[in-house]
Image (cartoon, rainbow, N blue to C red):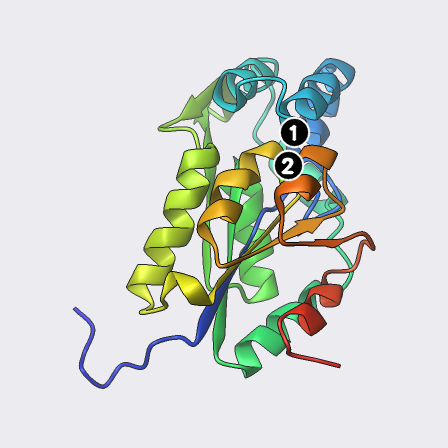
Amino acid sequence: MSTAASASARFLVVLDVDSTLIHDEVIELLAEHAGSGELVADITSRAMRGELDFEQSLRERVATLRGLGDDVFGEVAERIRVTDGVPELVEAVHAAGGLVGVVSGGFHELVDGLAEGLGLDRWRANRLEVVGGVLTGVVDGAVVDAAAKEESLRSWAADAGVPLRRTVAIGDGANDLKMMGAAALSVAFCAKPAVRAKANLAVETRDLSQVLPLLGLRG
Ligand SMILES: [Mg+2]
């Protein structure tokens, strides 16, 4: 229960992770270790263009990771490149009384460290099942798909006392469209054409601080 004195956040910004918060698609980095990099990269691009069912395609991609040791998470974490402008975006949103969340069709095993390091307020992702230090190739629990991304935005907003009219969603792929549709303002970030076509605004430079003027937070 929140107390009567607890202040509501002023607004909420929710970002996708792969190819938005970071340059990389983590599933592809993991797959390179499993020798399935090319196959997985091909499935990922088709899924992000909206040509494949996200959940089914994720399960197919994760299946190729079976047998990898869980030390792969540390190795991949070192290769992840955070998109330019993320610290500036987080700092400016916080300074203006907002919250920053990320929701990912990727994996908690990598997103947790990123989110904590960047000082994010909320995050949600899939989990990879590990037994005896080895990946089983199975997603543990329900898959974070397009519907789960939208649900995360709605529930984080409700919990923080933020009306939907003060929410922003930023993404690049087809599985971001539902959360972008639920938010008051949707920003396509270096996005697939199908996503750009449906967003309120598009940023074409790989620098997330470019979103700040769109939010009236700089300029
Ligand atoms: Mg993405």
Left or right of residue 89, residue 137 in this image: left
Q: Quadrant of the N terminus?
A: bottom left
- Looking at the image, is 46 positioned above or below residue 142? above
Q: Which residue is mark 1?
A: 48
Viewer-nearest residue: 193 or 113: 193
Would the CB of label 2 be found within 8 Å of ligand 1?
yes
Which x, y percent locates residue 199? 62, 48
Residue type for callout 1: Met
Q: Residue at x 81, y 52 (%)?
A: 204
- Looking at the image, is 50 positioned above or below residue 60? below
Residue type for callout 2: Gly
- Looking at the image, is 67 positioned above or below residue 184? above
Would the CB of label 1 be found within 8 Å of ligand 1?
yes
Residue 173 circle label: 2
Label 2, residues with CA under 10 Å away: few <14, some 14-19, many ≥20: many
Residue 139 seen anywhere in this rendered image of the structure: yes
